[in-house]
Image (spheres, helix red, strand yellow):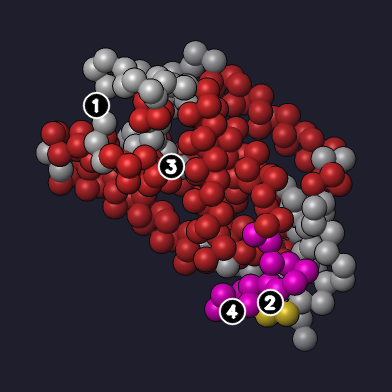
Amino acid sequence: MERARQPILNVPPVIIAILAALCIVHAVRVLVLSHNANIEFLLLFWFNPARYAATVPAGCWLLGGLAADIWSFVTYAFIHADVTHLGFNAVWLLPFGSTLARRLGALRFFAFFAVTAAAGAAAHLATHVGQCVPVVGASAAVSGTMAAAMRFAFQPGGPLASWHDHSAHQPDLVPAVSLLDALRDRRVLAFLAVWFGLNVLFGIGSPSLSGAAQTVAWQAHVGGFLAGLLLFAAFDPVGKTAVGPDNGVEQRMSSGPDRRS
């Protein structure tokens, strides 16, 4: 029997949970914490390359010690500069994150989110060694979900194909192509060109989306995107097991040979 197609607004619980966490963190910072308490919160949880410098730059404050050196690789992704910054990331996380979360399931998706966020922080660190240049925002992890979706979105029966093919079912569970095959697809190459082009435009001396003094941390975006593209196969259950569309329980698939890289 054919399964019903996924409704377009059927947002997986893990995406709702992450969006709720992003909103709660921002609301607490803006509405509950005092100015000084908010500064302390940021010093504890944003990602600052100065933490890993041999000598901390003058005027750069750091809190949390070794523990913050570790957790800030991920916690910075739950902090946003303002509502515009938060809203922009939420708008992109909803479609791409939902597509990926239905495929991976809650635990795999959250692990994927954390790994791509950490990869974004690592890229920011590599390009700002010894500098006091903090970064916040979920953009690196969101970029990772966008890259991962490219591995299966354009395939027959995939999420993009299902928009015009009403006979497609479970579009988020179609087998992914290998990384090499994906990079041979002109549609994927076009997406990569547009994505990298926009990040270069935003990153070279451009103001933030809110118009504030902060600039777009494009290096973190690139780090998260590349991690999502390269590490997707390590998280993808399709071809071995797949996540059921309703309850998140893994079910055996018989989709043929695994073509993942």
Q: CA distance from mark 2 to mark 3?
A: 39 Å
Mark 3 closeness class: few <14, some 14–19, many ≥20 residues within 10 Å: many
Which stretch appears magenta?
235-250
Q: Nearer the viewer, mark 2 or mark 3?
A: 3
Cβ atoms at labels 1 and 2 below 8 Å apart: no
Return the residue at label 2: 4
Label 1, label 2: how many angstroms apart (C-alpha)? 54 Å
Circle 1 crowding by C-alpha within 10 Å: few under 14, some 14–19, many from 20:
some
State the residue position of label 3: 73
Numbered badge on residue 213: none
Kind of residue at disc 3? Phe
Which quarter of the image is occupied by the N terminus? bottom right
Q: CA distance from mark 4 to mark 3?
A: 30 Å
- The mark that comes first in sequence, 1 or 2, is 2
Q: CA distance from mark 1 to mark 3?
A: 17 Å
Question: Callout 2, which amino acid?
Answer: Ala
Quarter-of-image position of residue 104: bottom right
Q: Which is more N-terminal, label 1 or label 4?
A: 1
Given the image, on which type of amino acid does mark 1 rest?
A: Trp
Cα separation, mark 4 vs mark 1, equals 45 Å
Q: Identify residue for label 4.
A: 249
- Residue visible at 68% across and 80% down? 251
Q: Residue at x 41, y 61 (%)?
A: 17
What's the CA distance linking mark 2 and mark 4? 17 Å
Mark 2 or 3 closer to N-term?
2
What kind of element bears circle 3?
helix
| Residue 67 point in image, percent of width and height | 32, 46
